[in-house]
Image (cartoon, rainbow, N blue to C red):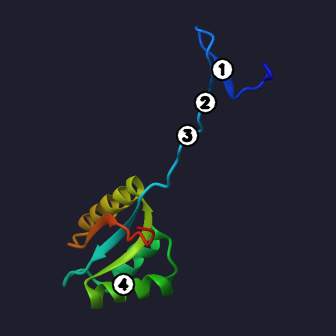
Amino acid sequence: MSDNNDDFWQDDNGTLTQEAPPKLKKPRLYQVVLLNDDYTPMEFVVELIEQFFYKSRENATQIMLKIHTEGKGVCGVYTEDIAETKAAIVTQYAQDHQHPLMCQAEPANDDKD
């Protein structure tokens, strides 16, 4: 074996060892969901989706209508930390504007299971 191979190293006992590459797996994804209520104006929900989830007016309106008719709607899918942060920020924003709108993060459906 060649001494210039960076994949191998020799410990104090003279044992030649090869480092195993780290086994990485994709992080679990979480969906950010808005929950329907009977008080928050539809226009506020549309503007909130545009502002925090960067959706077009048309797409935001479609999400708002799904929330209105089905009780909840997915605004985006992110890693856990980002999803939890977005849910907290959106809920706080709604509260700051005196609306009871609730936002939460929940595990996204994994089709690979």
Pointer 2 or 4: first along the chain: 2
Distance in Å between CA atoms under marks 4 and 3: 42 Å
Distance in Å between CA atoms under marks 2 and 4: 51 Å
Which is closer to the viewer, label 1 or label 3? 1
- The residue indicated by pointer 1 is 9
Pointer 1 or 4: first along the chain: 1
User: Disc 1, disc 4: CB below 8 Å?
Assistant: no
Q: Secondary structure at mark 2?
A: loop
Distance in Å between CA atoms under marks 3 and 2: 9 Å
User: Disc 1, disc 3: CB below 8 Å?
Assistant: no
Q: Residue at x 48, y 84 (%)?
A: 59
Q: Residue 49 location in percent, x, y?
A: 41, 74
Q: Residue 64 location in percent, x, y?
A: 36, 84
- The residue indicated by pointer 4 is 64
Q: How many marks?
A: 4
Which is closer to the viewer, label 2 or label 4? 2
Disc 3 residue type (three-letter)? Pro
Q: Residue furthest top?
A: 12
Q: Residue at x 28, y 91 (%)?
A: 69
Which is closer to the viewer, label 4 or label 3? 3
Q: Residue at x 44, y 82 (%)?
A: 60
- The residue indicated by pointer 3 is 22
User: Disc 2, disc 1: CB below 8 Å?
Assistant: yes
Disc 4 residue type (three-letter)? Met
Q: Residue at x 50, y 76 (%)?
A: 55
Q: Residue 10 location in percent, x, y?
A: 64, 16
Disc 1 residue type (three-letter)? Trp
Q: Nearer the viewer, residue 1 or 104?
A: 1
